[in-house]
Image (cartoon, grey):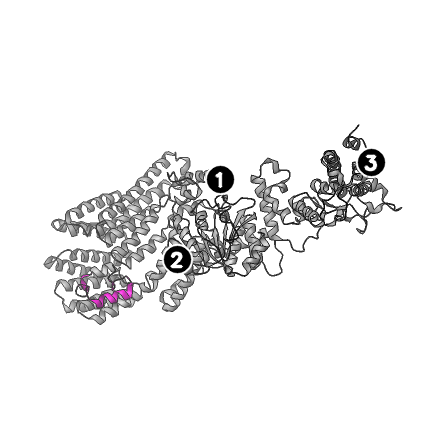
Amino acid sequence: MQITQLIDALRNVSPINFIWGAGCSGLDLPVTTSAEDSDAFRDRTHRKFGDSAEIDDAHASLLALGDYQRRQVLKCSTNWAGICLAELLRIGRAARVLTTNFDGSLVRATATFRMMPPLYRRDYPELRDAAAPCIYLLGDAPPEILVGLVGRGAASGPWIVIGCSGKRFGLSRTLLSVDRYDQGLYWVGHFHEEAPAELRDGLFTPERNAHWITGFDADSFMAYLLRGLGEFPPPRLVSRGQKIEPKACLEAFERQRPAETDLGPVMPELERLKTAGSAEVQSFLENLAGEDELALRAGHSASGLGTVACLLAGHRFPRLLKPFLMKAADLMEPDAPGDVSARFSEVCCILAQYSHGEGAAQWYARADASFAQMDFGPGCGAPVPYGHLPKWAAMLAEWACFEPGEQSEAIFGRARGTILDGVEKWEEMAAKKAAGRPSFVEAPFVKTSVDALGRQCKLAAAGFIPEFHQRARMLPAEKALELLAEARAWLEELPPGEGPYTELLAKHLFCEAEVAPQRQAALICEAEEQFQTLLRLAPGQAGAILSNWAAALSQLAMARSGELALALYAEADRKFQEAAKIASDAVLHNNWSSLLIREARERGGEPELLKRARGHAGRADALEAGKGSYNLACIAAERADREGVALWLERSAEHGKIPRLSHILRDRSFEKLRASQWFRELLEGIFDAGLVRGAQ
Amino acid sequence: MATWNARYKAGEYAEVWAEMEALGAGIRKPARRKAADAVVRETMKRARTNVQRLFAELPSLGYRFQGAPEPAEPDYPLELRIEHALEYVQKRGGREFKANPWSHPALAWVEDEEIEVPARFRKGDVGRSSYRPPGARMNGALDEIERQTGSPLPLAVRAWFATVGSVSLAGTHPALNRDGAVDTLRVTPEEIDRAAADGAGAEFVAAIRHAFAWGGFPGWSGRADAPERELAWLRSKLLPL
């Protein structure tokens, strides 16, 4: 059959379904993967990602890799086949594309035409139920999926098989299983390539209406097809009437490829968006999501939506942001292992905060999986190698501390191990650097000074100390003390007398006091010395230091009861008063109100204390919208004031100041409400976390 | 007694062909056919050499072959198809197709679909309207003529298309063919004399002999204003047949 006859036949039938094989790819892979080519590809893949027993050809090589690794290995270039198919999809002449290709060149081409047809991956609807146009990404699907889709969907339109050897995925067998292709089956061989031997006589018969087309490669066939059914070159690439060389068209196409989302113009909008109407924020984020998705499909990383949604999370309603954060997670995940700033993990952590139990664990696990794929060793080019490790550790610690479960101990152990691993690596590098013998693979690290590496060790260790404290509060005294002893040992490695470390040590001593009542007096005495030192070191920050001192006392008071507790609350109250005389801000008043709520509870609901607590929470809320609202909700709960609880919880959520869901569910203030349907519905309205359905 | 072929090679060109023609359809009888075929082969070998030399020499005189007009806008899909096929042959066609990639099966479609190859791919070679090499499609066309006329084509005619191909020297040149009005050597399947006898084809051979005698421009025959210098130079390059 000649091309002109084929095009005539296709003009009057339904939009075409394509089976799009490796020969259509922008990769330099042959249609029929010859031993030589697949060997070369395999070698390249092995060099980058190590050995795998399952690897036996190029496709299997790719299959053995994760999504991120594949994106690293596959560098595809724009080709005409992809462009022409994208244009046929755009003008409605192509309906469905079934492709086993991993390289994304077709998706990239559709993105360049600013199209986002549904991509079916891992979940494949029957052809008759699929959207048109759509693309089935069958790269890592088991062969029977393709077999089933084609077998059951053979009558859904004419078929063009192109770039396929027929040797894989049982394609030949599947096509033979269809008695007749009412609207035609056209298999485009590569130039003079012969039809697969097993099909030669059986498939390409007039009875089946199946035809073998020769004399083309994928690019030229698709160019002919597009000219026959539409316009070649696609009008979007050239102005009407303009003469343009095909090579220039390819360049024009590349220029039109959507770029990575530019947050430059977005950031100035951010302040306004923190307080703008929900509809405006929603519309803004929807646009950003669209741009990000287009960028991802076009072959870039897509972190714009995630970055903005994270920045808004401290200011906006969780339910408003949650769908965008979820979308951002999906968009960011493919490139997450290559992002040393770990923004994907930030998104996951926020989503974990909006969930609880198993739901939260799933988000942490996704972040964990992306960290596990990161490779920011000395060859990565980052100013400090292994810069992702502290973030990884912090994420794991958050998981272990805020979503306690059977695995918490192991997860916290991994967090601690991650920091230790980092410190060991940085120290080793610093030693090599000091000895002047970095190996050649560590060339970029040569730029990192010994001081910078030493600083990195300290920062990482110091940054993890609060995680020890948080975790210790969850453990029985004996284990907690063991953990705090380790933290103390870490602290002692830090330079004494420096402000941040002094404050850490003071807080640590209070924490130790919490779990060691017998040594409380001595520890408090030592801690107070540290705070006093701090006041001498930074007199300009006396307000904040006293406020932190008061908060530490308040925390300690919570670990006590009776007279001991009341004495500590009184001491903390005095410290807050001292602090407020110097500087008062929303944080101080909010912490002060927390103290008073706890003291009131300790005293059996003392109204005067609750009144004072309400006053401070109100001041915090006035100073920073939403900051005191959660405490006001707690106060309302102490007074069994449901309306107040709803009002203040929603206000705190509205301004993004609501604590994580699991904290609310554990908060003693809501003890009496926790099981009620009303309260769960209230939280569901804020977090959309499946609380009402009881799914979690 | 010397064979027809030996005599032909010795210079009895017209005589041998006349004797062969005199046998009429009897030339196809087995007893004669072998000897006739040797002459036909030798004649057509010389004809092919002459045609190749004319196509090589005429451009050096500034002759412009009349090809199909290049389209105002390039046929981009076709160019893409040719480019990629040539790249494919270059990469995977093997050494034997380095010199002439067009004979690789990956480019068989050019002949099958009677493609006029754009000038930029011909690298100075003449276009399809001036020269088409022998091929299956041409053979098919000749078979069809024979089927329609009910008799075989003369041996010489059939052998021309099997050995030389389709040739037209139509074109323009300030001296040789100022306005393209001078008759040139032109042997194409479309212009075969369907009424020709089914013998050896001496008349056909005489016509091409005449054309070569005029350097491929039989239109100058008998004209006083013929560009003798150019014709003599061309003639000097050609073999007698």
Residue at 20% from the left image edge and 69% from the top image edge: A636
Per the rendering, the mark at residue A34 is 1
CB within 8 Å, label 1 to label 2 = no
Q: Residue A342: where, in percent of width, then height?
A: 36, 51
Subunit under mark 2: A
Q: Residue at x 27, y 53 (%)?
A: A361
Labels 3 and 1 within one chain:
no
Q: Earlier in the sequence, mark 1 or mark 2?
A: 1
Chain for numbered disc 3: B
In the rendered structure, which amino acid carries the disc numbered 1? Ser
Residue B15: numbered disc: 3
Whether labels 2 and 3 belong to a single chain: the reply is no
| Crowding near the residue tagged with mark 3, few <14, some 14–19, many ≥20 C-alpha atoms within 10 Å | some
Q: Is residue A233 visible?
A: no
Magenta range: A667-696
Amino acid, disc 3? Glu
Residue A497 in picture, x, y percent from top left: 26, 47
- What's the CA distance linking mark 1 and mark 2? 33 Å
